[in-house]
Amino acid sequence: MDTLKIKNTLNLTRKMIQYNFRIIFGGRFIWFLLAAFAFYVFVAISGVWNGAVPDEEFVFDILLFPAILLIFYPMTFGIQNDLDAGILEILFGIPDYRYKVWLVRLVLVFVLVFLLLIGFSGISYIFLTPVNLFEMAGQIMYPVLFLGSMAFMFSTIIKNGNGTAVVMVILGVLTLIISENLERTMWNIFLNPFNVPRNMNEMIWEGITINNRLFLVIGALVFILYGLFNLQKREKFI
């Protein structure tokens, strides 16, 4: 009896995850995965062809933007997909909507991207250079978590996928420009922990990296909490 109950629970959980992924990615997940992989392969080949050293620093750089591509659509178009699917009214009828639905979805998406990054890191391990798969995937998840949470927050403010995408692209370009001046500081969203400056003590660099990761995590938590708070304002979505 217990075995049957566990089996039914697992089947229900699997169906719930599949259903949420279909809504989150709008049935286009495979295309975003292929696009991210194609971008990764193109940048890796171009870098090696141009003489880049295939080390951990190089792998971090070539994996960062495919990871952002994977997180971009579900976070910017998630609310829009709920509206298009006609289920937003139903979701708002669930008590503690923010905790039972979108918080679970956020966790699912970030876990999925983390697992995919482990796979991409494994490919890099085979074809480029030995890397610690979990460390590499974990380090890339910090900026991904920050930017993904920011996109989620703006999606709850703008309530339109295309509008959110435009805002995130503009902010992304501005962030890239600013990051050149913040390259070796804790405020650099795209800080590469494997790129240790030659004229800087490793202990100092480690401190900057830790502070940077704390900044990204705290920022992500603020974005998520603000986004979840916005989802309580039912009248602005229905």
Image (cartoon, rainbow, N blue to C red):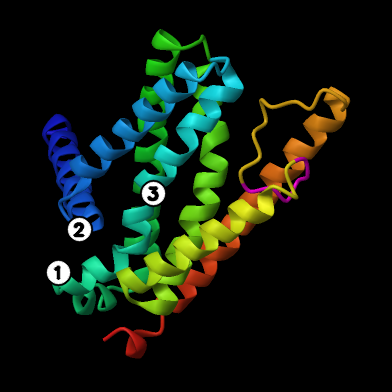
For image coordinates 25% across by 56% down, the residue present is 24
Q: Is residue 12 left or right of residue 25?
A: left
Are the residues flagged by discs 1 and 2 in contact, CB closer than 8 Å? yes
Compared with residue 236, is residue 184 higher up or lower down, i.e. above or below?
above
The residue that label 1 is drawn on is: 85
Q: Amino acid at mark 3?
A: Ile
From the image, give the main secondary structure of the stretch colored magenta.
loop
Q: Secondary structure at mark 1?
A: helix
Q: Residues within 10 Å of mark 1 (few under 14, many from 20)?
A: few
The residue that label 3 is drawn on is: 71
Compared with residue 116, is residue 121 higher up or lower down, i.e. above or below?
above
Q: Is residue 175 left or right of residue 11?
A: right
What separation in Å lies between label 2 and label 3 (alpha carbons)? 14 Å
Residue 103 versus residue 66: which sits nearer the camera?
66
Residue 195 point in image, percent of width and height: 69, 27
Residue 3 versus residue 206: which sits nearer the camera?
206
The residue that label 2 is drawn on is: 23
- The boundaries of the magenta stretch are 184-189
Specify the quadrant that holds the N terminus: top left
Q: Amino acid at mark 1?
A: Ala
Q: Secondary structure at mark 2?
A: helix
Specify the quadrant that holds the C terminus: bottom left
Residue 81 point in image, percent of width and height: 22, 66
Q: Which mark is residue 115?
A: none
